[in-house]
Image: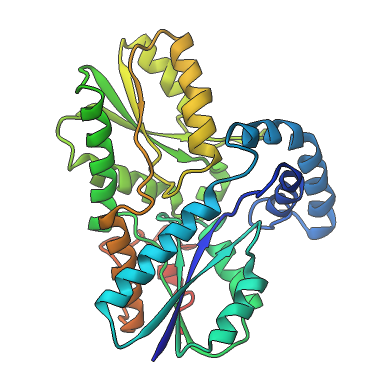
């Protein structure tokens, strides 16, 4: 019995020269810019050109490349080891498929086909489902993979106990390491989306808020908490409140801050630059004395355990979606409700 697990993530440039083509790949995705290809491709080229210098400066802070692939490789090895321990009779190999940079779906699909698995479990490293992340990666994989194996897909796991516990532990450990400072507000910061995407049935916002509530329920010492959204670009109306606005509000309220990147399971530019530098600098400018940031779970034992649980649930052909969460009926773009990938 051979099982392939394919981890999906965004990807990130592996050199400063790769920043511009990475941005082009990102913005030419129809899930990101919802225009016909004839208009989308030149617009993606323009955005990649105009944002290249600023983006390169951000990646330079991290040593000239994104750490996302090395982080994902650690997760892949940890998950492979955990599944090997749980199911010794199954030869499990974990592969990585990045959406906008190497290794991309075509390359990974060839590697999986060469492995010739009996079953394949597609596992997005996006805890909260969105048409712009998980759905885009799943569609790209379906296009690329023509090899053997029954395929099943993990949709999301925004309130899975191990996932929630990993974040709660990271928050508490960060707070305790700082000496348990008083009067601290907990901000759950997630990557933003244009509001029109959510209004069209995307469940992302509902799932982010469910994740935050489940984590906060394990942290009674943080009764003052709030969800906010970072990384907005362009002129469209985005989900709010914005993280930078919440930093200013905390200053006005005389609060310290502890920020949890609730929608990110690996360190990358949004955490290591945006949270650790840009918002930290803003907090200092605003006179906030305490600014803390909890790390992403990466290879936390309970998080890897959740991923293993998800794989085993799908491999067992459980007809119910993995985890306790089910999107309300209003969120028709949810893959759980559409039965996406369950074949």
> Left or right: where does residue 119 sit relative to residue 24?
left
- In the current view of this chain or complex, which residue is farthest to the left? 220
Vertical comparison of 158 with 55: above or below: below
Vertical comparison of 245 with 170: above or below: above
Percent x, y for residue 151?
A: 47, 82
109, 223: nearer the viewer:
109
Q: How is the image coloured?
A: rainbow
What residue is at 63 percent from the left and 57 percent from the top? 31
Vertical comparison of 114 with 36: above or below: below
Percent x, y for residue 193?
A: 54, 43
Percent x, y for residue 13?
A: 66, 49
Percent x, y for residue 304?
A: 32, 60
206, 116: nearer the viewer:
116
Mark yes or no: residue 239 visible.
no
Q: Quadrant of residue 147?
A: bottom right
What residue is at 23 percent from the left and 50 percent from the top? 165
Mark yes or no: residue 168 visible.
yes
Q: Quadrant of residue 128?
A: bottom left
What residue is at 41 percent from the left and 50 percent from the top? 265
> Left or right: where does residue 304 sit relative to residue 237?
left
125, 189: nearer the viewer:
125
């Amino acid at each position: 019995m051979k099982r392939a697990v394919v981890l999906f993530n965004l990807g990130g440039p592996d050199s400063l020269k790769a920043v511009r083509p990475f941005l082009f790949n990102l913005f030419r995705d129809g899930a990101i810019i919802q225009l016909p290809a004839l208009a989308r491709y030149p617009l993606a080229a323009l955005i990649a050109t105009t944002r290249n210098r600023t983006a390169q400066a951000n990646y330079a802070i991290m040593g000239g490349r994104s750490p996302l692939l090395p982080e994902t490789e650690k997760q892949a090895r940890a998950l492979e080891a955990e599944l090997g321990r749980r199911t010794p009779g199954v030869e499990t190999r974990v592969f990585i498929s990045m959406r906008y940079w190497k290794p991309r779906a075509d390359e990974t699909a060839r590697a999986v086909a060469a492995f010739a698995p009996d079953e394949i479990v597609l596992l997005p490293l996006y805890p909260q489902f969105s048409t712009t992340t998980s759905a885009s990666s799943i569609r790209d994989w379906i296009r690329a993979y023509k090899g053997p194996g029954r395929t099943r897909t993990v949709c999301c796991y925004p309130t899975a106990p191990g996932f929630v516990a990993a974040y709660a532990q990271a928050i508490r450990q960060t707070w305790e390491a700082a000496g348990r400072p008083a009067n601290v507000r907990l901000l759950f910061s997630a990557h933003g989306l244009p509001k029109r995407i959510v209004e069209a049935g995307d469940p992302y916002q509902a799932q982010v808020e469910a994740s935050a509530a489940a984590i906060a329920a394990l942290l009674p010492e943080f009764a003052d908490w709030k969800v906010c959204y970072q990384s907005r670009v362009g002129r469209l109306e985005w989900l709010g409140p914005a993280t930078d606005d919440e930093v200013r509000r905390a200053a006005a309220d005389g609060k310290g801050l502890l920020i949890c990147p609730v929608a990110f399971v690996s360190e990358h530019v949004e955490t290591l630059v945006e949270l650790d530098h840009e918002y930290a600098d803003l907090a200092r400018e605003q006179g906030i004395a305490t600014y803390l940031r909890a790390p992403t779970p990466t290879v936390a034992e309970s998080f890897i355990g959740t991923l293993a649980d998800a794989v085993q649930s799908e491999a067992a052909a459980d007809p119910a979606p993995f985890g306790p969460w089910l999107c309300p009926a209003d969120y028709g773009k949810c893959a759980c409700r559409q039965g996406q990938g369950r074949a």
